[in-house]
Image: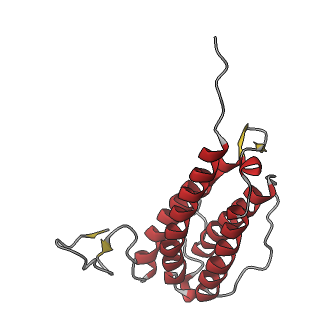
Amino acid sequence: MTAQQGPTPEFAVAYRDTMLMGLANEMKATKKVLAAVPDAKRDYKPDPNARTAQELAWHLAAADVQMLDETADRKFVMEARFKDEPKTSAELASWYEKNFLRAIERVRAMSAEELLTPVDFYGAFTLPVVYYLGFVNNHSIHHRGQLATYLRPMGAKCPAIYGGSYDEPWMGGGAETNAA
């Protein structure tokens, strides 16, 4: 049996650049969903076992940024890094954009060697740190979808995410898509 070769430095850099481009686009949609949460209804939750809209929005924003920072640090820790939660949805959306973009630049500055550093993820597994960018992407999309489902029951409009929504129709090139 032949030992399997790990990712090359060129692959790590290309993967990082591709993921960061996608994450920057996802951040724009996530920011719209965070900003759409009505401040007067931030304590809404669809079920007694669910997080409130405020808890979910803060988790989404803070954990996304923390995971990017931890990727750059090449070390994951359970303790929440950010303690000062913004007071309004507009402040949270602004905080998220500013800190997400800052953290992306930290990852963009990593060398190929740093990107290929094997890093433990809470004792569950160890991967080259560049692969955790996929976790950031999936985490963001997962919780953004949860939060988007809170919006209409709170009396808010659901922004377009991938194409149009009923509240924000897509008007680009051809047939309109008004899903969700």
Q: Give the x, y percent position of residue 91.
A: 64, 87
Q: Give the x, y percent position of residue 24.
A: 55, 69
Which residue is pictured at 57% across the width and 52% down the height? 14
**Is residue 138 rendered to the left or right of residue 5?**
left
Callout count: 0
The C terminus, quarter of image: bottom left
Depicted 15 relative to depicted 40: above or below: above
Q: Nearer the viewer, residue 146 or 107?
A: 107
Q: Give the x, y percent position of residue 62.
A: 69, 69
Residue at the far front in the pictured view? 10
The N terminus, quarter of image: top right
User: How is the protein colored in the picture?
Assistant: secondary structure
**In the rendered image, is residue 117 in sight?**
yes
Residue at the far top in the pictured view? 1
Which residue is pictured at 56% across the width and 62% down the height? 140
Residue at the far left in the pictured view? 175
Q: Nearer the viewer, residue 88 or 53?
A: 88
When asked about the image quadrant of residue 3, the answer is: top right
When asked about the image quadrant of residue 49, the answer is: bottom right
Which residue is pictured at 52% across the width and 58% down the height? 142
**Is residue 98 rendered to the left or right of residue 15?**
right
When asked about the image quadrant of residue 31, the answer is: bottom right
**Is residue 69 rendered to the left or right of residue 19?**
right
**In the rendered image, is residue 46 in sight?**
no
Q: Nearer the viewer, residue 145 or 27?
A: 27
